[in-house]
Image (tube, helix red, strand yellow):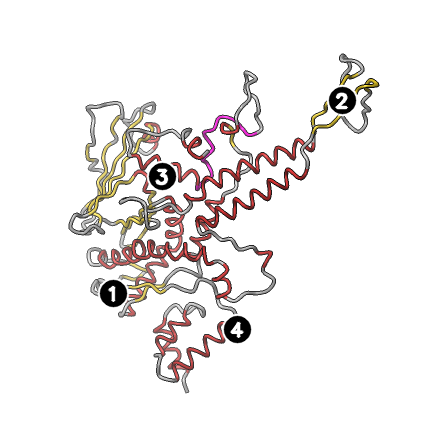
Amino acid sequence: MFETICDTVPTDTGLPARVARLEILRRVLEGTIYDNLPYQFHEERNGAGEYIPLRQRRPSVRYGLARIVVEDSVALLFSAGHFPTVEAADAALARALGDVIAESRLNEVMIDAAIRGSVGSVAILLRVLRGRVFFAVLESQYLTPVWDVQAPDTLSQVTEKYKVNGADLVAQGYAGADPAAMYWFQRIWDSEAEIWYLPWPVNDASAGPVRDEVRSVRHGLGFVPMVWIRNLPGGDGIDGACTFRAAIDSNIEIDYQLSQAGRGLKYSSDPTLLIKEPVSSDSEIVKGAGNALVVSEKGDAKMLEIGGTACEAVILYVRTLREFALESVHGNRANADRLTAAQSGRALELMNQGLLWLADNLRISYENGGILPLMKMIVRASQVFPLTVMGEMLAPLDSTQRLRLRWPRWYPLSADDRLKEAQAVATLTNAGQLSRETAVKTIAASHSIADVEAELNAIDQDAP
């Protein structure tokens, strides 16, 4: 069924094949995969009286399983209580990067990037405007990366190219564009500049890209100010594996089964009337509690309806499909009805082990391929442009420092968990097997300690 629906999505042969694949996955994520089917689900006959197959109807019920799995996993990555902290040997450097993260709202950027990137890949663009750092999420559908031959993990160029309507170009300030024509739009990022090109007509074979000197910008950073994040291990050289691909077929089956069940309930509320040998074929038959049906001696009248057992079977089948789909993509299969009491953080981790495995794999991609490269770019950019953070000018940051991320626990500790952790940390510290700094870092996330060095200074001041 999924392949049948994919055939209804228009494709452009002038673009790379991955564009069509990512477009379909994006539609699944956003719940618009059925929009090109020609008929509503309640339409059983077309204008010619012909029966409309289910494969040509848009389901009336849409269960966003793919979106649920993606948002659950992203929440474990970058929600308010799960965003990592940058650490470095130089505490001043760590504080400066923490201020940049807060001011640029990198938390929201990474949530957006992880959701969009769940189809396979995503790009994050770094910009420095008037000394301030900004990030922008770019969907990778129309982007083509080129990697450095001598450093395969380093971008040497990224090209954005797609078709755009002339009317949209006119609205963007391209006064010479024909509103009724289609144009190619292109821009390229390299290690020295962001190059824009004047749009050129799609149907003009002699036309080609001409540099737009007005919109092109030279940044002179010495590196492409963009990180390319592959979602999960697998995929090809450009895109990683999709988070929810294994659940798409089951998700489509769930949508159609629930739509059919809803259709059956509507028919049960207004069943079809069957009359055998009525008294007069000319008389008008009106079914209802206030109308008695009179038939001949050998006649009969019945209501044709769907029994409740059929609907129950559909619901049971849908629940089974949902379990299989969530299991295939490591989604959250926990049932809140089974929680009879407050659970410890460790118990919640065991109960949602599949979802944690998924989020743990995503951490690899979005840490080593996302946050850490962005932090290193900020450090290098500070040596080219004077940066302003929280209204204060930053001195050039030390690029020789090793950066790392400290991630909080998956689930908050219960009061009993915190007590046991505090006792263990105190015992190790008093025995000389753990430093005070490491002890504070250990409990920093659960006690909302953002600055470990400042906390140690406060402890020294409070000491008698």
Residue 443 place in picture, x, y as percent: 42, 72
**Where does label 3 land, which residue?**
22
**Where does label 4 land, which residue?**
416
**Quarter of image, res 406:** bottom left
Q: Earlier in the sequence, mark 2 or mark 4?
A: 2
Q: Is residue 38 magenta?
A: yes
**Where does label 2 land, which residue?**
286
Dot 2 crowding, Cα within 10 Å, few <14, some 14–19, many 20+: few
Compared with 100, 313 (above or below) is: above
Helix, strand or loop at mark 1: loop
State if disc 4 and disc 3 touch (CB < 8 Å): no
Helix, strand or loop at mark 4: helix
Q: Amino acid at mark 4?
A: Asp
Q: Amino acid at mark 3?
A: Leu
Q: Residue at x 46, y 58 (%)?
A: 353
Q: Amino acid at mark 1?
A: Arg
Residue 97 place in picture, x, y as percent: 31, 62
Dot 3 crowding, Cα within 10 Å, few <14, some 14–19, many 20+: many
Gap in Å between the C-alphas at discs 2 and 1? 82 Å
Mark number, residue 428:
none
Which stretch appears magenta? 29-41
Q: Earlier in the sequence, mark 3 or mark 1?
A: 3
**Where does label 1 land, which residue?**
402
Compared with 209, 452 (above or below) is: below
**Quarter of image, res 294:** top right
